[in-house]
């Protein structure tokens, strides 16, 4: 457990982050249902589009969050499922013009959840898409942004703060994956190193 958070505080941060990441699409579904109830068929195509997009995003994100933050399950030993689930999550973050692609190579379930969290953390720093590469080599997991792309300097600064044992001043729930990753690493007697050159990445060993 991170020394600056209690178990309750960490759970609160995770719940807040997950809620934040799904509430927009839940609201969109609610609005679409209200339009249906009003019975105005002039908007039927818009309603259909809203429901399709929002349900796809909600499904992808909730499946990812279930694996990344939930209780251990057999899917964490299925690397094909991890690949698909994580790719679908990244599609909800990127856009058609600026997608986020993934190259994933895992060999042991030990790194499954850590890889998903690290991918989530690095994806948060991307401004206009890019490629994330996660590879397990021996007793080490390397997750890096494998393309030259725009990154959020503020988010990188706050990730550094959390890794150094401090709390960001604002929007702390945004960094729930970093706090949780530290907890898992501590339980496994492992540590993480943030690299910034030649590209941003997280090395766990």
Image (spheres, rainbow, N blue to C red):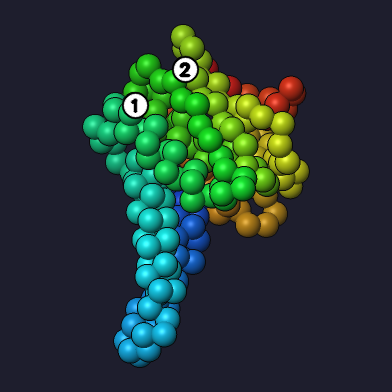
Foreground tag (1 vs 2): 1
- Residue 77 in the image: state x and y as whole percent: 29, 26
- The outermost residue toward the top is 138
**The residue tagged with tag 2: helix, strand or loop?**
strand
Report which quarter residue 39 is drawn in.
bottom left
**Residue that appears at 45% across and 30% down:** 114
- Residue 76 in the image: state x and y as whole percent: 31, 31
- Residue 105 in the image: state x and y as whole percent: 44, 20
Tell me if residue 137 can be seen. Answer: yes
* Left or right: where 91 falls relative to 152: left
**The residue tagged with tag 1: helix, strand or loop?**
helix
> Please, is residue 88 above or below residue 30 in the view?
above
Instruction: In the rendered structure, find residue 79 and report the number of the disc placed on it.
Output: 1
Please count the marks in the image.
2
Instruction: In the rendered structure, find residue 136 and report the number of the disc placed on it.
Output: 2
Tell me if residue 4 can be seen. Answer: no
In the image, 45 versus 84, the foreground residue is 45
* Left or right: where 196 falls relative to 100: right
**Residue that appears at 61% across and 48% down:** 97
Label 1 to label 2, Cα distance in Å?
A: 12 Å
């Amino acid at each position: 457990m991170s020394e600056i958070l209690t178990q309750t505080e960490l759970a609160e941060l995770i719940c807040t982050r997950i809620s934040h990441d799904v509430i927009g699409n839940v609201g969109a579904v609610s609005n679409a249902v209200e339009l249906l109830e009003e019975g105005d068929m002039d908007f039927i195509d818009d309603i259909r589009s809203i429901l399709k997009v929002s349900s796809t995003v909600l499904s992808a994100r909730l499946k990812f969050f279930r694996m990344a933050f939930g209780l251990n399950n057999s899917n964490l030993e299925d690397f094909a499922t991890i690949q698909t689930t994580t790719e679908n999550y990244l599609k909800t973050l990127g856009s058609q013009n600026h997608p986020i692609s993934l190259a994933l190579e895992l060999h042991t379930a030990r790194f499954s959840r850590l890889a998903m969290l690290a991918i989530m953390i690095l994806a948060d720093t991307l401004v206009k898409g890019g490629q994330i590469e996660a590879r397990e080599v021996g007793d080490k997991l390397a997750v890096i942004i494998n393309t030259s792309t725009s990154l959020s300097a503020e988010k990188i600064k706050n990730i550094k703060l959390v890794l150094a044992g401090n709390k960001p001043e604002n929007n702390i729930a945004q960094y729930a994956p970093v706090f949780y990753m530290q907890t898992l690493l501590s339980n496994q007697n492992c540590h993480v190193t943030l690299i910034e050159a030649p590209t941003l990445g997280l090395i766990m060993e």
